[in-house]
Amino acid sequence: MMEKIVIEGGKRLKGEMTVHGAKNSALPILAATVLTTKRTVIHNCPRLTDIDAAINILRHLGCVVDVDGDCVTVDASDINCWDIPDTLMREMRSSVVFLGAVLARTGKASFSTPGGCEIGLRPIDLHLFAMSRLGAKINEEYGRLECECPEGLVGDKIALSFPSVGATENAMLAAVTAKGTTSIINCAREPEISDLADFLNGCGAKISGAGEGVIVIEGVKSLGGTEHTVISDRIAATTYMAAAAVTQGQIKINNIIPAHLGPVIPMFEEAGCDINVCGHSLSISAPPRLKRIKTIRTMPYPGFPTDAQAPIMAMITVADGTSMIIENIFESRYKHVNELVRLGAKIKVESKVAVVEGVHCLYGAPVIAGDLRGGAALVVAGLAAKGTTEIEGVNHIDRGHADFEKNLTLMGAIIRREKE
Ligand code: UD1
């Protein structure tokens, strides 16, 4: 059934909330459970449709998965399959992160090739390069990708031409049980990489250097079970911060990891917000009118995250002055711009660059979410807008934001979900 989110904007956010676990950490960790024959328990696993998609893949592969709130238990002792059907692959583009783990566990992997997605072409050449460096034979035919390593994978040097998050994760997953030592050079340094390494090391892997420029993995024969708590979602936290900022709000967000918000906090400060970090909580208090942010450049971590680009753009549409955004990570990641313009924003896009001229106020209108973060940006804008904003394409938002309306309602927003 089609659903939409309806927001009566202009309400000041005030209150306290707890942010959920990181989707982008939980997904590769769920894939990693395939590597062990023992039981793994994952806490703080967010309840999202992307996580459901990953669980469906695990069950298809033969795992017994038990979900109890935000705790997921996986028993992968009886993996009996190495192919992931097209329907499951299509549910979530990042299912390619299962490649390294399935290949390492079963010696084979068969996937449909992921096409493009809402934010542009998403090639997997770096993933395949990493697999082939470890000795996998790869065949691409009829839209399917067949990988094989009958003799097992063998550690080697993998020098990535770009620090891709997914390719780094796949390389790690393939390498932990490979023969010998693997080094991943120019690897991604995102906090989600370190979380995956912590999970795998908890299972007995020997990974060092996660979070730095080179990851070194000494292959082990097999992995055991573990219990792990997923890190908190820095992008969801940033989205709530943006929501507070556009509504002249004052909120406290619990369960954050301050260091992971290091790249975004300066932007909120430049916009005139007061930020206070105390332990694992962050308080943000917004001024009556936000100031412009001169330049935002999306970069691999520890740079400003591309996933926060859309919600921050929504925020600066109502700032005093003109801001500039340069999107360096993905091509077509400005699909939310036209919808923000419908709400009265003044934005011009020229290839990687968006120029946002702050307006005094946005006006509610019907809009359509075309992707996850762009959809969250429309919620942020709707909270700021005068009148009613109706957002279609809620399925995109549900991929990454658990209890979104509930949390916002508890902090004073007027927001509800309607079935059409
Ligand atoms: C992950 C995140 C996503 C985030 C992105 C960048 C997950 C599930 N998703 O996506 O939310 O926006 O990191 O922080 O964790 N590229 C290639 N070849 C490849 C792989 C990537 O050219 O084989 C390019 C991509 O097209 C893109 C760039 O590298 O331009 C970054 O992509 P990557 O870091 O791989 O992002 P994902 O892992 O897909």
Image (cartoon, helix red, strand yellow):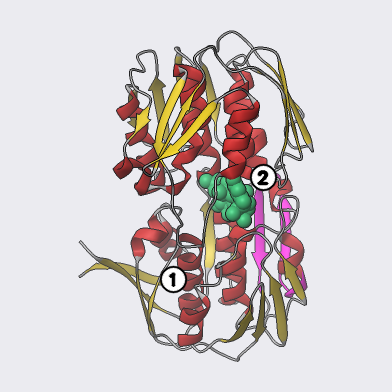
- Residue 90 vs 287, above or below: the answer is above
Three-letter amino acid code of the residue under disc 2 = Ile
Q: Nearer the viewer, mark 2 or mark 1?
A: 2
Q: Is residue 11 magenta?
A: no
**Residue 84 at x, y = what percent?**
35, 34
Asked if residue 336 shows in the view, the reply is yes
- Disc 2 secondary structure class: loop
Q: Which segment did they paint magenta? A: 270-286
**Residue 298 at x, y = what percent?**
70, 62
Q: Is mark 1 within 8 Å of ligand 1?
A: no
In this rendering, the count of numbered labels is 2
Badge 2, how many Cα within 10 Å: few under 14, some, many 20+?
A: some
7 and 251: which is toward the camera: 7
- The residue drawn where x is 59% and y is 16% is 177
- The residue drawn where x is 44% and y is 22% is 108
Residue 397 is left or right of residue 316, and the answer is left
Badge 1, how many Cα within 10 Å: few under 14, some, many 20+?
A: many
Q: Residue furthest top?
A: 221
> For residue 322, what is the image quadrant?
bottom right
**What is the C-alpha distance between the residues marked 2 and 1?**
25 Å
Residue receiving disc 1: 413
Residue receiving disc 2: 257
**Residue 92 at x, y = what percent?**
40, 47
Q: Which tag, 2 or 1, sits closer to the chain's start?
A: 2
Residue 150 is left or right of residue 278, and the answer is left
Three-letter amino acid code of the residue under disc 1 = Ala
318 and 416: which is toward the camera: 318
**Residue 368 at x, y = what percent?**
38, 74
> The N terminus appears in which quarter of the rendering?
bottom left
Q: Is residue 274 magenta?
A: yes
Does the CB distance between marks 2 and 1 fall below 8 Å? no
